[in-house]
Image (tube, grey):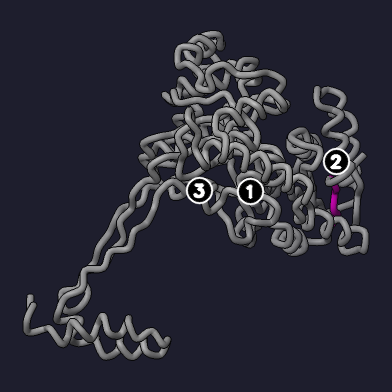
Amino acid sequence: MIPIYRWPSPEANAYLEKVSSRGAQADPHLEERVAAILESVREKGDAALRQWTLRLDGFEPGSLKIDPAEIRSLAGQVDPELREVLRQARQNIADFHRRQRQQSWEFEASDGVRLGQRITPVSSVGLYVPGGAAAYPSSLLMNAVPAQIAGVRRIVVTTPYARFRANPVVAAALAELGLQEVYGIGGAQAVAALAYGTESVPRVDKIVGPGNAWVSAAKRQVFGQVDIDKVAGPSEVVVVADDSAHPDHVAADLMAQAEHDEAAVALAIVFSRVQAEAVRASLDRQILELSRQATIRRALERYGAVLVVSDPREAVGIVNRIAPEHLELLTREAESLGRQVEDCGAIFFGYDSCEAVGDYFAGPNHVLPTGGSARFASPLGVYDFVKRTNLVKYTRAALRRNHRTIERFALAEKLDAHAHSVRVRMETAGESEE
């Protein structure tokens, strides 16, 4: 089911190349179809939203906005114990993200000059909650909590209505978060409504949240009109395991990743062929107990592998080459190994730190860079929901001391109006001294 490769080898290198290039090229046909949806919503507003919802989701919505009473009613159908789980998870996420708050600051330079930076929240955020094969209240929590901590005044949620009705747990998460501006629309048309605004859906300043290829393409195309969090690709996990790790744990964590999507990457890096065979045998046995066998098998066949390396340095080199979304270190020297990793979205240290702990409950955000973007991108956080405004409070004394330097710099760029705007102040200095 899952291939085993010795590193280094041509086969192992080809596998890493396939993983690294996965999803690198946009589908022109999909991009064109998404562009048509965006343009129709931009031009026709609510009428286009209704048209696309009927065409793609199979029903014509009544009110696009979901009544808060309906949210409360659906939330009330959720088992109280599960609602308590959501409450505890929200608290853990909030405890972590409160530590990411940033403060405005100023300092005094020479000649009485004051410089600084003001931190203010984004005014409005649109949060997309997908409606695919499963419900994702965890993603709702992970996106909404840092926005709330940042101080965002208006948080809008869009989610496909049919899936919302079928999964009351999303309504329970909305109730726990206190979010009431919710629209029952999904897909590229929902992204268009958030970006451009319609008669019923006021536009927002930033769009966050996961989605399918249509949603990702739409977010990519509206960027610039609004900000976005990132264009997420299929999920990834790399599990580095030495002979102290139980093969069943390694196999279980690979399958947990593979059940997300047939394009998910699930890679184990081990240190012996015997260990690799034990992981593969465990996969073959444990998969029979799981409901999403077909998806898991397809993902493991397409983008799964067990790489056998000689030493930890090779393992670290492979990890940094892939820059995975999730990295599990099931080794005796997990702390030491983790310090050597440069490119990764999240690191899970030790045998009990399985990815599922981070996905749902520990507190750090599970919205992580994918597709190798951990080389330059970071997990979602409070810092994604604030703006930074630079502050410059110059004085006449400072301008008098530096004006020739500034003028010379401007003239070097052949921008004489810039230079003039400084010079004219010196020429009129006697008329407007401090």
Disc number for residue 182? none
* Lower position in the chain sequence, tag 2 or tag 3: 3
Instruction: Judge the density around disc 3: few (<14), some (14-19), many (≥20) Cα neighbours within 10 Å.
Output: some
Q: Is residue 148 left or right of residue 15?
A: left
- The kind of secondary structure the magenta stretch mainly shows is strand
Label 2 vs label 3, nearer the camera: 3
Q: Which residue is mark 1?
A: 231
Q: Is residue 109 visible?
A: yes
Q: Which residue is mark 2?
A: 300
| Closer to us: 409 or 326 | 409
Q: CA distance from mark 3 to mark 1?
A: 13 Å
Percent position of residue 191, x then y: 58, 38
Percent position of residue 110, x then y: 19, 78
Instruction: Verify whether residue 108 appears in magenta.
Output: no
> Magenta part of the protein: which range?
304-308
Q: CA distance from mark 1 to mark 2?
A: 23 Å
